[in-house]
Amino acid sequence: MRDGDDFVLNGQKIWTSGAHTADALFALVRTDPQAPKHRGISFLLIDDIKTPGITIRPLTDMGGRHYFNEVFFQDVRVPARNLVGEENRGWYVGMTLLDFERSNIGGAVGARRKLHELIDVVRANPVLRERVNNSSVRQEIAQRFIETEVMYQFSLRVISMQNRGQVPNDEASTSKLYNSELSQRLAQTAMQAVGMLGNLIEGSDESFGRSYIGVVPATIRGGTSEDQRNVIATRGLGLPRG
């Protein structure tokens, strides 16, 4: 709601990553309740996370980690000068930001690092090495290796576009879709490779068991896999909306 030179925010949001360590945040807020769903939304910067009326409640995931939160807004006053873009057209600002988030050019590096970590663990353990060599997991690891290299090429494509001043769109969705599903396949392969050792998640933030649990929301955050396929179909392939 607009009140003179301020916007007054009321509401709540679930899944605000890193809010408990942040100094500031941004919010997409509805400023015209009569407008269609993708209009009437404004993009606001909130300079201080300690602004009166903001309450942060921690949420702990099923792996025992706290990295996202629920945020409540009660009569939070934000100066109108903190508006990004046009009033009531903040959705389009947010979608442009998502194009960069979904690009995830570091995802390929993370997948490659996790894969090499798995290979090192298997090689160093004679029992695991024999177990993997005598099962189909060996072929799965090889397949994950190929897929991480494909993801690396997706990242290079997005980087080259950004270097030319272009904003990736369906290319970003392709990268996000592929990487998020790859991260889940890689975690599952790792658990099959290490067997019962994967249950040892206590005391290690980087254990394979914790990674397996942690990648469950990978195909939800930043837009679901279904959302990415719709973007690729309509904006990349020019297909009609279903």
Image (cartoon, rainbow, N blue to C red):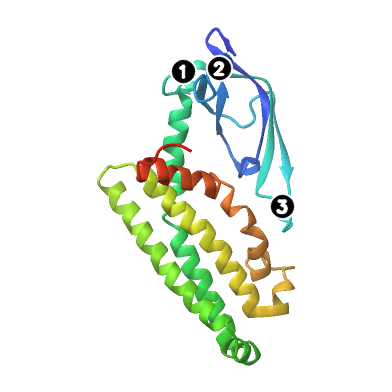
The residue lying toward the viewer, choosing from 31 and 140, is 140
Q: Residues within 10 Å of mark 3 (few under 14, many from 20)?
A: few
Q: Do labels 2 and 3 touch, CB within 8 Å?
A: no
- In the image, farthest residue toward the top: 4
| Mark found first going from the N terminus, 2 or 3 | 2
Q: Secondary structure at mark 1?
A: loop
Measured in 3D between alpha carbons, the distance from the residue under mark 3 to the one under mark 1, in whole angstroms, is 35 Å
Where is residue 210, by image quadrant? bottom right
On residue 87, which mark appears?
Answer: 1
Q: Secondary structure at mark 2?
A: loop
Quarter of the image for the N terminus: give it: top right
- Is 2 drawn above or below residue 187 in the view shown? above
Where is residue 207, by image quadrant? bottom right
**Amino acid bearing label 2:** Thr
Q: Position of residue 56 (x, y in %)?
A: 70, 36
On residue 61, which mark appears?
Answer: 3
| Mark found first going from the N terminus, 3 or 1 | 3
- What residue sits 62% from the left and 52% below the top? 217
| Mark found first going from the N terminus, 1 or 2 | 2
The residue lying toward the viewer, choosing from 132 and 19, is 132
Q: Do labels 3 and 1 touch, CB within 8 Å?
A: no
**Amino acid bearing label 3:** Asp
Q: Residues within 10 Å of mark 1 (few under 14, many from 20)?
A: some
- What residue sits 49% from the left and 63% below the top? 110
On residue 31, which mark appears?
Answer: 2
Measured in 3D between alpha carbons, the distance from the residue under mark 2 to the one under mark 3, in whole angstroms, is 32 Å
Q: Position of residue 115 (x, y in %)?
A: 51, 73
On residue 126, which mark appears?
Answer: none
